[in-house]
Amino acid sequence: MTPHIRAEPGEIAETVLLPGDPLRARWAAETFLDAPQLVNDVRGMLGFTGTWRGHRVTIHGTGMGMPSLSIYANELITTYSARTLIRIGSCGAMQKHIAVRDVILAMSATSLSTPSRGILREMNFAPCADFGLLSAAHAAARSKGSTTHVGGIYSSDVFYDERPDLNEQMTRHGILAVEMEAAELYILAARHRCRALAVLTVSDHLLTHEALPASDRQSSFGDMVEIALEAAFA
């Protein structure tokens, strides 16, 4: 056990899907896994382990932001031996050709800072996805007919951003979307020699201000979960 995860040894699978919202972890586990079992509920951060097509999978919430994700990813890797970690979550599009409900596969993750900055110090480390996972996710998305974009994203420290100038530069430099967790996940995966990927669904658009209604989010996020699962075991 760890301070934030009460699972017993062996109750966490080597493959872990990481939604930010613990209730989305419950929904994904009950929708896509066979015989999901609750393995963690410390501080309301839910984790479930079950099987998908015979493969053991854990789906565990991380909370919002890189500091929160860093806690859970570190403990899942160092204490529970997770080796493949795939973030599944929402993002805000930053390019005109991207639409709400599209899927984005994050090849790289730009950030102003991450919890790992104290280790990396003056280095501008460039965190990126595992190519095998990225390639498999792209193939899975194409087979499903999902409108999919592959490229760089921006992991923000803040949700209520008051830097329109920074957003303009992200858009200018081809950043596809903004979210709040992937950069730290990719850095931790590099440090611990794990595989990591972020599979994201566009829930809103920073340029058009279109947003996915809350009632439609669960059904639209289903493709994202299936793509992540197929990529993990390709």
Image: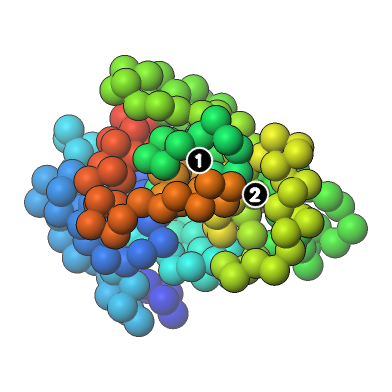
Indicate left or right for 27 with 204 as reference.
left
Q: CA distance from mark 2 to mark 1?
A: 14 Å
Residue displayed at 30% across by 45% down: 221
Return the residue found at the far left.
Answer: 35
Q: Residue at x 29, y 23 (%)?
A: 144
Whether pointer 2 and pointer 1 mark residues with C-beta atoms closer than 8 Å, the reply is: no
Percent coordinates x, y for residue 20 in the rendering: 41, 61
Residue that mark 1 sits on: 197
Place of residue 78 in the rendered image (x, y in percent of width and height, measured from the top left):
51, 60
Classed neighbour count for the residue bearing mark 1: other residues with Cα under 10 Å, few (<14), some (14–19), many (≥20): many
Camera-nearest residue between 124 and 156: 156
Which of the two residues, 58 or 134, is positioned nearer the viewer here?
134
Disc 1 element: strand
Q: Is residue 123 shown above or below 108?
A: below
- Quadrant containing the N terminus is bottom left
Mark 1: which amino acid?
Leu
Q: Nearer the viewer, residue 189 or 222?
A: 222
Looking at the image, residue 135 sits to the left or right of residue 113; the answer is left
**Of marks 2 and 1, which one's residue comes earlier in the chain?**
2
How many dots with numbers? 2
Q: Secondary structure at mark 2?
A: strand
Is residue 28 at least partly visible in the picture? yes
Question: In the rendering, at what x and y percent does residue 214 appear?
Answer: 29, 59
Taking the spot 60% from the left edge, 38% from the top edge, the residue there is 95
Residue at 78 percent of width and 47 percent of height: 169
Identify the residue position indicated by label 2 in the image. 154
- Amino acid type for the residue under numbered disc 2: Tyr
Q: Is residue 96 left or right of residue 99?
A: right
